[in-house]
Amino acid sequence: MSLSTGATARTASPKERSLWMLDRLVPDAGANNVPAALRIGGRLDRPALRTALTAVVRRHDALRTVFHAADDTLTASVLAPGETDLDVQEIAPSADGPQAALTAFAGTPFALDGRPLIRVGLLADGDDDVLCFVVHHLVFDTVSAGVFTRSLAGAYARVLRGEQPYPADEGTGPVPVLDEPAPRPQSTDFWRDHLAGFDPGALETDCGTGHNPARPTLAGGRLDHTLTPAATAAVRKLAKELRAPEAVVLLAAYYLLLAAHGAGPDLVVGTPVNVRGDGAADAIGYHVNTLPLRTAVDPGESFRALVTRTRNVFFGALSHADAPVDALLAEVARPGASWRGSLFRHVFNYVPAPGDAGLAFGDAPARPEPAESGYCKFDLELNVLATPETLSLRVVHGTEALAEADARALVRRYDALLSGLGEAADRTVAEIEVGTDADRAALRTGYEEAVRAGGTAGFVTSAGGREALPGVRGELCLVATSRPAADDGGYDGEHPQYGPYRRTGELARRGYDGTLEVLGRADRRVTVHGVPVQLDRLEALLASEDGVRAAAVVLRKGDDTDTGGLVAFLAAPDDPQLLDRLRKRIGAELPAAAEPGSFVVLDALPTAADGRPDLAELERRAAAGGTTGAGGADDADGQLLADLVELWNDVLERDDVGPQANFFELGGHSLLAAKVAQRSGKLAGVRVRLADVFANPTPLTLAEHLRAARA
């Protein structure tokens, strides 16, 4: 491969910079890699394949576009055709099988150092070759994959016949990069209005791991599932009955599924759309806009009404797809320091039947082979692959947000939901059941086993008042062992199956096997920067650290800059290494938002009459700014802290930032955070990663991090 030499450079677009931010956040991951693979019925001629590959890459300027990353700038240029010669790599086999070998090849990151962002490999698997190509998303998308595959197959066949890779009637000059037109003002206005007032905190579900690490790995898992005939038939029946594309019916059901798991009621789901214009269908490049489709799930409306609103949102978005939504990130309020996007955490993608049936490389037939990079940018990506006969799901999930059991449960429930919707178009959302026979059995078994064992029988209720599905967090309710007298006022309600119950205020969830897990007090669950944090769980972690005799955490109310955060009070010795150990443990075990902005070390915590920490007194101290001690405002390196406060003011274009001000609460986003990382590193004389800013979003906490890095 060649490095870029004299090509004219241009500044990267906001859409390209958005992708780059993800590379900077997780520099050792191939989260932006777009892989595809084909199983070839036989062996490919290596020299012929290399000749064809070189011709295709030289043909398309997009495949010769390279990027240079330096500090907080990203520039792009196009290599001359003669500067690009690619080798076909031999992919090493894996003891875990061909999929593991392909994932290792697909997940290796690219360096943005002027080299081409494409690699191609062959894996010998039995009598077959598996052809795998991987391209960075900066110059490629899934539509490009089909164009590239067809071009490569055609060029390869001609080379085998002794012909030129491209026939004369197709021209010999390079295909320029498609220049997308500037967005229309009305499209920008549409998205600004569409997202006005949106609270990204509504995207949080009550299922999954609850882990939102400041330094993510972006590790992803994949599940494949073919919808049952009943589900497929129901979708296509509803599409005709409701006069909506089946993609809209499937999307409306996806909203309903997410809402049943605690998201919403105001929901945004991202859906990728091809923005190539007329006459540019075969353009290779990054020409996708992921549209944030926003709608509300109202329990009192019918599914028919939800489909109608979803259809209106869907077509309204498509008609304004020319405006890159990435450019609007700075205008959308962010809930706080999270690497997750502020617009959506769940993706829906409807893909019609592929058009590569009968594809061959010479005389060797080729068929698609699964290829994954092993990474996922979102909590859940639902890809629907539609053929005239079937609807299949390819589900990719972020393993830091959803364990495999959670993802499998969501897939099964989606199938069951679709099956039941065929006769439920006019039922209200509240009347539509989301759950499988296995879910109902787990709920029933868990309750009955508790009764038989003579233990406390209970159930978990969701925010909407229904019994929560297995794996979904909610409030624990205890069921009466016998029916109370009619005038007994000690019960909070009556479950239609279990009878009278009392609310406990405890947060719990029913496991997929029916076991009941109590997670802590519901009234000690707070939302920090849009992320739920269980304070008693955080306190237990702090108190388990060597030397910490007691711990209590309170949420400080916002000050005049509308910031707030957690303050941890510790009864502990004066240990200069204590905070560093605690921050590492919190980062490894809890969401990033659970890391306190301030730590206060005391000889002993104030206690209430019952002997427990006096939370009211601690809240008063936190509000009064009583953050003396470890991690408090009396920074040992006052100049560094002052410089960081000035940096916050400069980057955010403000003049009222204080040491505790959260960068993201004040309108910061990933592009601006990159500037903070670069400039703060120069201030302290150390390397600062983008993830460090997400993990330390206030001048005070970043100053502590920089001092530790220098030490």
Image (cartoon, rainbow, N blue to C red):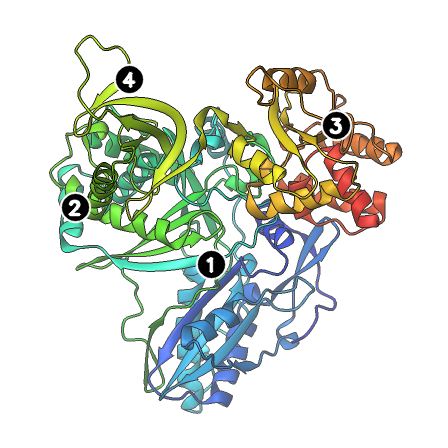
Residue 64's mark?
Answer: none
N-terminal of the two: label 1 or label 4?
1
Q: Amino acid at mark 1?
A: Asp
Residue picked out by circle 3:
603
Tag 2's secondary structure?
A: helix
Comparing 325 with 692, the one in front is: 692
Above or below, 323 relative to 55: above
From the image, state whether disc 2 or disc 1 is nearer to you: 2
Residue appearing at x 50%, y 60% in the figure:
140
Image spot of residue 599 (x, y percent) = 71, 31
Q: Amino acid at mark 2?
A: Ser
N-terminal of the two: label 2 or label 3?
2
Residue 141's mark?
Answer: 1
N-terminal of the two: label 2 or label 1?
1
Q: Amino acid at mark 4?
A: Asp
From the image, state whether disc 3 or disc 4 is nearer to you: 3
Residue 492's mark?
Answer: 4
Comparing 134 with 495, the one in front is: 495
Residue 419's mark?
Answer: 2
Q: Identify the image quadrant of residue 664.
A: top right
Q: Quadrant location of the N terminus? A: bottom right
- Crowding at dot 1, Cα within 10 Å, few <14 / some 14-19 / many 20+, comes out as many
Q: Amino acid at mark 3?
A: Asp
Q: CA distance from mark 1 to mark 4?
A: 54 Å
Image spot of residue 45 (x, y percent) = 45, 90
